[in-house]
Structure formats: structure tokens, C-alpha cells
Amino acid sequence: MITTAPEPIEAAPATPGGRVWRRFRANKIGMVAMAMVIVLAVVAITFFILDRLGIPFPMDPDATNLERKLLPPNAVNWLGTDNLGRDVLSRLLNGAYISLTVGFVAVFVSLFIGVVVGAVAGYIGKWVDNLIMRAVDALMCFPTFFLILTAVALLGPSIFNIIFVIGLVSWTGTARLVRAEFLTLRESSYVQAARALGQRGWKIIFRHILPNAAAPILVTAVLGVPEAILAEAGLSFLGFGVQPPQATWGNIIADGKTYILDAWWLILFPGLAILLAALSFYLTGDALRQAVETRSERQ
Amino acid sequence: MTAFIIRRLLVSVVLLFFISVISFFIITLTPGSPYPWGELNPKVSEEVKRVFREKFHLDRPLHEQYAFIMRDLFTGDLRSIKDERPVLQKIGERLPATLVLNLGALALSLSFGLLLGIYGAKHAGRPPDVITSIIAFIFIALPGFWVSYLVAIALVDWAAVPILGTHTIGVAFTDGAQVFLDRWWHVMMPASILAIGGIAVQSRFVRASMIETLREDYIRTARAKGLDENAVFYRHALRNSIRPLITGIGMLLPALISGAVIIENIFAYPGMGRLGYEAVLERDYPTLVALNFVTAALVLLGNLVADLLYAVVDPRVRLE
């Protein structure tokens, strides 16, 4: 669906992907942010696998030890322990995959719905377009987080439901964008040529129009990941995230808030993790947007 | 103008219909029951269940349930399943506090967003712009609930800022000015934290719009006739950033109301967000449907106001 950037050719990148990559590479902040995203992903996958293999590293995230409860950061527990004596660092690393999974998969769901809805509205046009866009307008009037909270609370909090609901309510931006791209691209000469050659509608949509709208769609996708991460953290904080004993960044803060005046490390570190994760995706997405836009922002 | 308002109101009615249908089906089609007792509780007789279902029309097919809910909503008869008080009355009690909180946050977002955005545009592409951009993204990426707790730890002892409720408990101010100041003192913290994301979004928006404006022909003309760069920037270009300011109203409102759900809970602030959270916990379907409807109507109203203001300040915009 989305063309990935091919290997950069140093002299003169012939492909659009190569040109975008060359502009992206020149953006230092974007490169640092993307490196952070990759590190986060590697950490999340590594500790997910370690957890499934039953290797407690650095410690078992669920092992309680009441003799060592609420300890501030020390040589053994680098980020301290919580009210049950569990190691905060281990819990943070163990919870990383929840945030990133929700971020990526929810965006994939919303991208899928948004692209299909937007493509149908933009390609067919007329009353279909009108009907779909009014429904999109209506959805955009909802306070999204409240809608997510309502649906997750009623469906029951599980990682699948959280991903599904976040994806289901956050596709409207993508749909609008894809529709706008389709409205212009529909009239382009190569699409008319394809139509004159008798190609079918869905083939024109997916083979001819969609690849040409890939760049802005990719940008909204990357910028959608942190939104989903923050929504998951908020749900988790309110107690509607993935349920304990599984650690998530949001529920470590929720558990820690009882001990707010005694154990600042229970609040500070998971929050920093959420902030860093969301920030690196936002900065990567913004750098990507600048690389994709043909007009420079500088005067 | 009148024709435009009438048309927009008609479109809003259609949108509200869509909204009510969407929220009704999201809430009723999800599994789980709204009954105040456990589904299999043997102490509840069939008769009690039947009476309860009939009272809230839960024995009817879905489309009839929807019709009943909407009829009751408009006649003001819609009652909460939890305490059987009229839902509109419950929302009405929370509305003023919510409006103060959200409009306060909106004002903060727009004003500080404007300042940050102008600063960024003025130095576009240079280090000050890069720094303010990164600050803006940090603001967007900050989880509001986390900031609330950090601020609570830092400020309560140091500055004695209140973090609970809307007014000082146990003190009956008689002076109107004191009551007013007490309210503001209480709403200040939650409103500021709620505004953090809005400031950042608005600043990005203002910045982009200013940079766009600076490319316009009339700016080139102003420069060509030898005007001082500051005069070009602040007198000619800045006027146009009134437009993103107005668009910001319509754009920020849903996000603010969303954020308020968490912030109101942390600060024990009796607004609609907290009512919604309580209704979610209690599976109070009528309250949830009505809340979604009322907030969506408020957002639509905000958008309409924004569009009208747009036409007032920008003579190029014709309302058709």
C-alpha cells in the first residue's frame, strides 16, 4: 500500500522515495528522532521476547518483594521499586511493547478504514461523497477520547479492544486527506488514460491513484502513532487499559499516584517514557512532512 | 448572512442526527448490561427486571429505543438509569464549571499559541524557530495526567495552589469579588494544564499560516516600497493571523473537551468530563447518549461561531 523508500542513490535520486530520503537525511532532528523510534522498537521487541521466554531481565517485572517496597532509585533497582517491591525499570521495559503495539496497530486499523472510505468518497464523488463526508464531519464533532473511553469501558479493556476502538475513531483525518488527494488525482491525465484503456475502478484506485497519494498518507500515519500511544496511556491511567498484573506505562503511574508524596519515581519515570516515545514519533513525522512537501518552509 | 446561518443550522441538525445515531449504537451495541444488578443475581425477581426494562424501554427493538431516547431527550424526560434524575438537569449542573474550564483553556491556548507561533515564524528556519518547534512538540507529547501530578507535587507546597474542586471548602465568602477570585484561583491550574497541548497545536498552526502569508504579493509590495521589516511583519502580515486564531476555536474544542475528562478527574473538578467518566463506570446509557449529544452540539456551535467570525474579520470570505 505504501511504497517504502528504496536505497538512496548518491548522485541524483531518480525515484521520489530517494529524493524524500535525501531531504529527510539532511534533517538532524528528524534523524535523531527516527533513531529513537528504532531504539524504542528494538527495546520493546527484545523485552517482549525475553518475557515470553521467561528470562527475568533485569528482574522479573511481576515478582513482588515486600521487604524492598517503595525504595528510591538505588544500585539494585535503578529506577526504584513500587508498593509491592516490584522493580520499576523491569516493569517499564516490560510495558514498552504495549504502548508501541497499540500505537502501530491502531494506526494501521485507522489507516485502512481512512484510505478505503476516503478513496471511495473521492473516486465516486456525487451523493456518495456527500453522505460519507457528512458522517465524517459528525464523527469529528465527538470528543475522541471520551468516545474511546466509553467504547473501551463498555467492551471491556483488552489490548485487542483498545487497538480496535482507537483505530475505529481516529480514521477521519486520513479519510479527509485521502479524499482530497483523490479529487485532484482523479482528473489527472494518467487516470483518464487508464480509464480510457478500460481498467476497472478498484484497479485504478489501488494501482494508479493510491501510490501517488502515498507520501501524505505516510506522514499522517507516523503522526497518528503518538496520538494512539497517548490515548492508550490515558486509558491505562484511568484503569481501562491492559489489566494488571501486566505493566503498562499508564498503569504504573495510576498505581503510583497513591504514593505521590513518598515515591516520586513511580510517577516521574513512566511519564518520561511516554513523553519520549510520543515525542520521537512526532518529530520523525514532522521531519518526514518537511521532506515530503516540495515547497521549502524557509524564506 | 441570514441565509448562511439558516443553511448552517440545517446542516448542523443533519449532523446532530448522525451524531445521535452513532453514539446510540456505539453505546447500546456493545456487550454488557445497564442493569444496576448482576445479570444472574437470583435475588432479583423476573417481575422487577421486567418493570425496569419497561421503564427504560429496554424491552423494545433498537430503533424504537432510539426513538424513545431522542423523544425523552428533547422533552427533558430522559432520566439517568443510576439515580433516575433528569439527565438534562444533571448536565445543566455541570455545564457552567465545564464552560469556565474549557473556555479558560481555550483562551490560554489561543493567546500563548499565537505568541509562540509568531516568534517561530519571525525566526523561521533559524535556531530560535527550531527550539520553539521542539518545545511545541514536547507540549503536544506531554501526557496531561502526568503533568498534573508533577505540578501537584511541585506547586502545592511551594505556592499553595489549590488542586481540588471549584472553591475553597469550609469558607463562605460573602463578597462577590472574593467568590470570583476564589473560583479563578481554583480553575487556573486545571485550565493551564489542559491548555498545554492546545498552545502547541495552535502555535504550529499560527507559524505555518504566518510563513504562508509572508510569501504573499502584498508583503513583497510592502517590502519593495522600503518599509521597515518590523512594520511589514507586525502591521501587514500579523493581521492575517487572526484567521488561524478563529479556526483554532473550532479545531481545539473537541480536543479540550476530551482532555477535560482526565483533568477533571484528577482535580476533582465537577464538570461534564467527570460526569461522563462516572456515567461510563455506572453504564448509565441515557446519560452517556445525552452527554455525547450535548458536547457535539457545543462543538458544532463553536464551529458556527468560528465561521461567522471568519466572515466578519475577513472581507474576502463570502458566506454562501
Image (cartoon, rainbow, N blue to C red):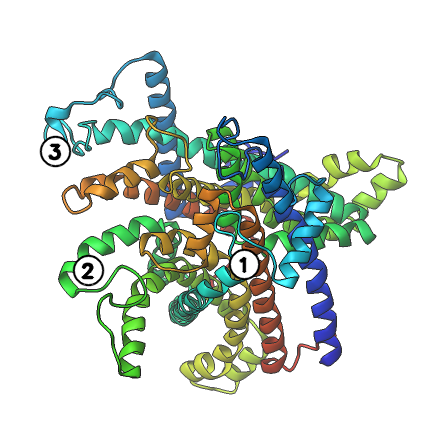
In the rendered structure, which amino acid carries the disc numbered 3?
Answer: Leu
Residue B155: assigned label: 2
- Chain letter for mark 1: B
In the rendered structure, which amino acid carries the disc numbered 1?
Answer: Pro
**Residue identifier under label 3:** A71
- Chain letter for mark 3: A
- Report crowding for label 3: few under 14, some 14 to 19, many 20 or more residues within 10 A (C-alpha): many
**Residue identifier under label 1:** B86
| Callout 2: SS | helix
Q: CA distance from mark 3 to mark 1?
A: 49 Å
Q: CA distance from mark 2 to mark 1?
A: 39 Å
Q: Is residue A19 depicted above or below B109 in this figure?
A: above
Judging depth in this view, the residue of B307 and B260 nearest the camera is B260
The answer to whether residue B56 is seen in the rendering is: no
| Callout 3: SS | loop
Q: How far from the left and from the top, in percent, is residue A68?
A: 12, 27
Q: CA distance from mark 3 to mark 2?
A: 24 Å
| Callout 1: SS | loop
Q: How far from the left and from the top, in percent, is residue A93?
A: 30, 29
Q: Are marks 3 and 1 on the same chain?
A: no
In the rendered structure, which amino acid carries the disc numbered 2?
Answer: Leu
N-terminal label among 2 and 1: 1
The answer to whether residue B271 is seen in the rendering is: yes
Q: Are marks 3 and 2 on the same chain?
A: no
